[in-house]
Amino acid sequence: METQIVRIAGGVEMPLVVSGHMPAGFRHGFTTCAGGVSAPPFDSLNLGWKWGDDSASVDENHRRLLAASGAATLLRASQVHGVRILRVGRSDDLAKVAGEKADGLCTDEPGLGLSVHVADCTPILMACPRTGACAALHAGWRGTVAGMARAGVAAMVAHFGCRPQELRVALGPCIGRCCFEVGDEVVDAFVAAMPARHPDVVHFTPGQRSRIDLRAFQRAEIEAAGVLHDNVDASTDCTLCDAGRRSFSFRGAGRSTGQLLGFILRK
């Protein structure tokens, strides 16, 4: 993945992390901290309203991102760390969708942007060049164990007739294996759900807490669902390592942090 600088009205520059794996007919990106108006500790492009930032600042940040994305609107849902995925369209009311408890959105309508909020969880974007369908998914460790990545592939197949082998997938910045230390109960949950006992997911170190690689699990599930290995692009960025510089991290700062956003739309 690489960082692109998008310039919008007023000379504002917004860095977006993008994947070269996404088809040409789609626009997408993962935000960083930069390009917004929020004051510390939410500086500057905080896109989440729920942890105490000034709502007018968050609204302005969303206005800027909407301009940078090229979308007519950016839909979002009320994320609950589950695996429910909503199919949405132009006729759907923005506020009603925002109130739905779901962790994924999908559509095949052009110009309609889909988005997910994260602050250590993985934003997963999917696109199908043949059907024009796309999806945005939110996967924390609970959603990952429950199979959100696999559910995303299934939704694209069921709703739009996509073939798994033609899907393109981007796994955005999240907390990395370097920093995601967990207790035994989380390890047990991953071991029980691990696709084919994938060896790269749980890392044991004698005398220390175990570490989890969320993206390794998600990639294994996506490929097990039929997506080609070369069609999956995974960021190597860790939100906790980059906290305060490029990323927001809930684990690093708790409720004194902002939220990043992943988005996708068909042009």
Image: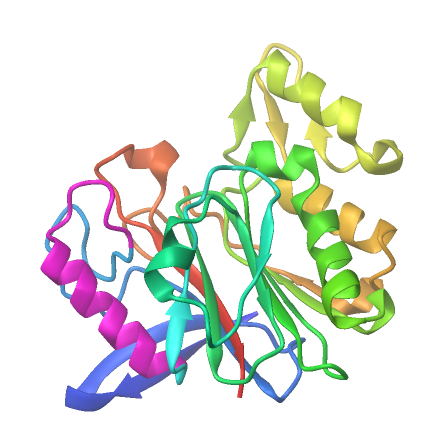
- Residue 95 picture location, percent across and down: 33, 59
Judge whether 180 appears above or below 186 on screen: below
Residue placed at 86% from the left, 50% from the top? 224
Magenta-span inclusion, residue 40: no
Question: Farthest top residue?
Answer: 207
Residue at horizontal 82 percent and vertical 62 percent from the top: 227
The answer to whether residue 172 is seen in the rendering is yes
Q: Nearer the viewer, residue 160 or 10?
A: 160
- Image-based side of 14 in relation to 40, left or right: right
Q: Main secondary structure of the magenta part?
A: helix
Residue at the image position 30 percent from the left and 54 percent from the top: 245
Determine if the magenta segment contains residue 50: yes
- The quadrant of the rendering that contains the N terminus is bottom right
State which region is magenta: 48-69
In the image, 83 versus 254, the foreground residue is 83
* Residue 211, position as x, y percentages in the image: 60, 28
- The answer to which of 172 and 55 lies nearer the viewer is 55
